[in-house]
Amino acid sequence: SQQGEEDPQALSIQEGENATMNCSYKTSINNLQWYRQNSGRGLVHLILIRSNEREKHSGRLRVTLDTSKKSSSLLITASRAADTASYFCATDDNNAGNMLTFGGGTRLMVKP
Amino acid sequence: DAGVIQSPRHEVTEMGQEVTLRCKPISGHNSLFWYRQTMMRGLELLIYFNNNVPIDDSGMPEDRFSAKMPNASFSTLKIQPSEPRDSAVYFCASTGLNTEAFFGQGTRLTVV
């Protein structure tokens, strides 16, 4: 079974709008990571947030982590058509020594 | 570093044939993962190595699948005999301790 579950499964917005994707997980973690995948390509790492961090920024990306609720969110501000991709969260399980488990992903479409 | 290198990029084979997928992780990384991605099942973790030792192979679908990591710079995933339901994109990824994973470009396998 998957550790992380993203919500929504699909999201369609207009260029310039913000996109928010959520991730829930089940076990205790060392860190949580977000990845992006363009169609037909490998996953590319976006941002890593450690279990003792609550918020992290990278350019137009903002990630929050709530370990009490076992959830995380990824916010992309001022979206662009080039942000169209699938976004995955992955958890580094505390009890599984570096094992990365991915959720089902959110397919984001940004319309120009 | 050229990143994680997978070969071949595409493989078309007939049902019943043996298929071998190859991966060269990033030098210095101590963990290697094999994932399978399909539309129906998303991104599934097949097996995970740490310091060349298989740690968790619970995601390997059945005995037809086997993976080896004879040294820190090379891993193989073998399917014997292959079946049409094995058709998918297979990704290899490597990571250091508590860092992000770097993915290869994947091998698109089609079994006819």
Image (spheres, helix red, strand yellow):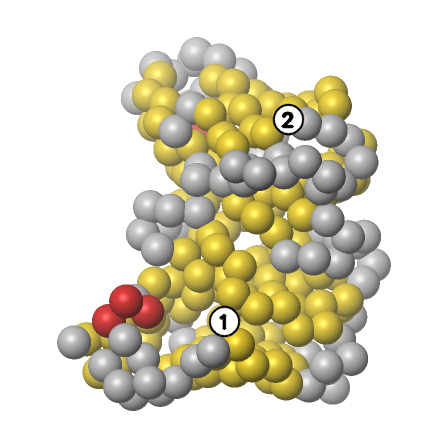
Give the class, few, some or many, for how many residues have Cα within 10 Å of label 2's Cα (few <14, many ≥20).
Answer: many
Front-most of B88 and B22? Answer: B22
The N terminus of chain B sits in image quarter:
top right
Which of the two marks, 1 or 2, is nearer to us in this view?
2
**Chain letter of the residue carrying label 2:** B
Nearer to the camera, A86 or A95 = A86
Q: In this view, does A61 lie above or below B19?
A: below
> In terms of secondary structure, where does tag 2 sit?
strand
Q: Where A84 falls versus B20 (above or below)?
A: below
- In depth, the one of A100 and A15 nearer the eye is A15
Q: Residues within 10 Å of mark 1 (few under 14, many from 20)?
A: many
Compute the Cα span from label 1 to label 2: 30 Å
| Residue at x-position 33% and y-position 21% | B12
Residue depicted at x 35% and y 27%: B10
Q: Residue at x 19, y 75 (%)?
A: A111
Callout 1 touching callout 2 (CB < 8 Å): no
Q: Is B18 displayed left or right of A81 in the figure?
A: right
Write down the residue under mark 2: B75
Extreme residue in the top direction: B17
Subunit under mark 1: A
Q: Is residue A69 visible?
A: no
Residue A71 in the image: x percent, y percent?
62, 80
For mark 1, what is the residue?
A: A6
Please indicate whether residue B37 sits to the left or right of residue B33 in the image. left
Which residue shows up at 68% across the image and 79% down it? Answer: A70
Decide if residue A93 is on the left or right side of residue B5: right
